Amino acid sequence: MTELLSVVVPLFNEQDNLPELYRRLAAVLDALGCPAELIFVDDASRDRTPAIVRELASKDARIKLLSFSRNFGHQVAVTAGLNFASGTVAVVMDGDLQDPPELLPQLLEKWREGYQVVYARRVSRTRESLSKQLFAFVYYRVLQRLAEVQIPVDTGDFCLMDRQVVDLLNTMPERNRYLRGLRSWVGFAQTEVPFERPPRLAGVAKYNFAKSFALALDGLVSFSRLPLRLATWMGFFTGLLAFVMVGLVIYWRFFTRSPLNGFGALAAAVFFIGAVQLVTVGILGEYVGRIYEEIKNRPLYILKEVRGFERTAAARPRPPLAEHEP
């Protein structure tokens, strides 16, 4: 392989994992013998992560650093790395070593076979809590059933993408990004490489339940209109139920002595209709909130430091979002 390989690694407080990550990545790239660039995207880490990247960059010209002015999130960090990637092929992987660098040769082999997107599918999750495994199992399968595009189950952001796919992703301006859905949406020939996901080498997981749920919600809202249809169906169902209740109340009032025609039945109906209205407003709010985020048209990210890209400045033009760097 003579084409340039770009490896994009988002980082947030990964000082304990970074030296071992670099050692294993460098070993794999040296064995491949291909030109490569390692793009580390620091998402405003509060530890020595950016300092360690600078130290490594002083010894290895393949290393490049993008550093955010504040924390913009994992999906935006991956987006920034892809914006700056110059390679014919780009690989996205996390910096906690749960995405093993040793899988890169298998991803590249599938690319040589003609596939333009090769995603790594997790066949097992070592040392993860049962609740997290259950949440992931249910979520991916629900999303696959509800989404308007076919999003593979049990896959994260660990993948290889051809230059054509990367260029298409870089033209997409949406802000609530769900990259594993976007890479499925673009189409092209796609395949998987199964692997057993190892535990984190060090540190704590950055995706707690709240962040995982927010990402899951982004995926559902971005690629499915079913929640909106569900709100409509709930409205029809409530109206039908109300019509039935009116008939029952009339029947009870004139033909029976049922105790259900009093305040209790009325209160239950009011609470039920109120709950349906609140759920419907909440669903609409999720979509309207995303419209609000889009129309503000703020920069997706702001860079406070760009290091190493001057060595390959002529490789590819930078995308418009990069113009917001100081």
Image: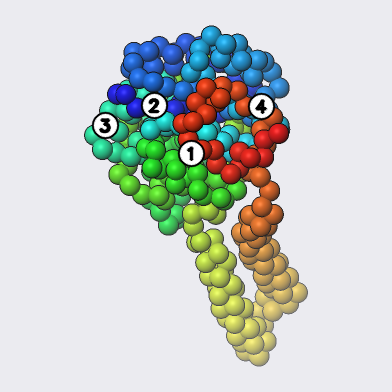
Mark 3 or mark 2, whichever is nearer to me: 2
Which mark is drawn over residue 305? 4
Residue density around tag 2, few if under 14, some if 14–19, many if 20 or more, within 10 Å: some
> Between 8 and 292, which is closer to the camera in this rendering?
8
For marks 2 and 4 on the same chain, the one whose residue lies earlier in the sequence: 2
Q: Position of residue 276 (x, y in %)?
A: 64, 66
Snapshot quadrant of residue 74: top right
Q: Position of residue 147 (x, y in %)?
A: 44, 54
- The residue singled out by tag 1 in the image is 136
Q: Is residue 228 visible?
A: yes
> Between 78 and 259, which is closer to the camera in this rendering?
78
> At 46% from the left edge and 31% from the top edge, which residue is drawn?
315
Whole-number angstrom distance, CA of label 4 to CA of label 1:
35 Å
What's the amino acid at mark 1? Ala
Q: Position of residue 271 (x, y in %)?
A: 70, 67
- The residue singled out by tag 2 in the image is 4
* Label 4–label 3 contact, CB within 8 A: no
**Which residue occupies the extreme front position in the image?**
314
Q: Is disc 3 placed on a helix, strand or loop?
A: helix
For marks 4 and 3 on the same chain, the one whose residue lies earlier in the sequence: 3
What's the amino acid at mark 2? Leu
Mark 4 or mark 3, whichever is nearer to me: 4
Whole-number angstrom distance, CA of label 3 to CA of label 2:
14 Å
Mark 1 or mark 3, whichever is nearer to me: 3
Q: Is disc 2 placed on a helix, strand or loop?
A: loop
Q: Is disc 4 placed on a helix, strand or loop?
A: strand
For marks 1 and 3 on the same chain, the one whose residue lies earlier in the sequence: 3
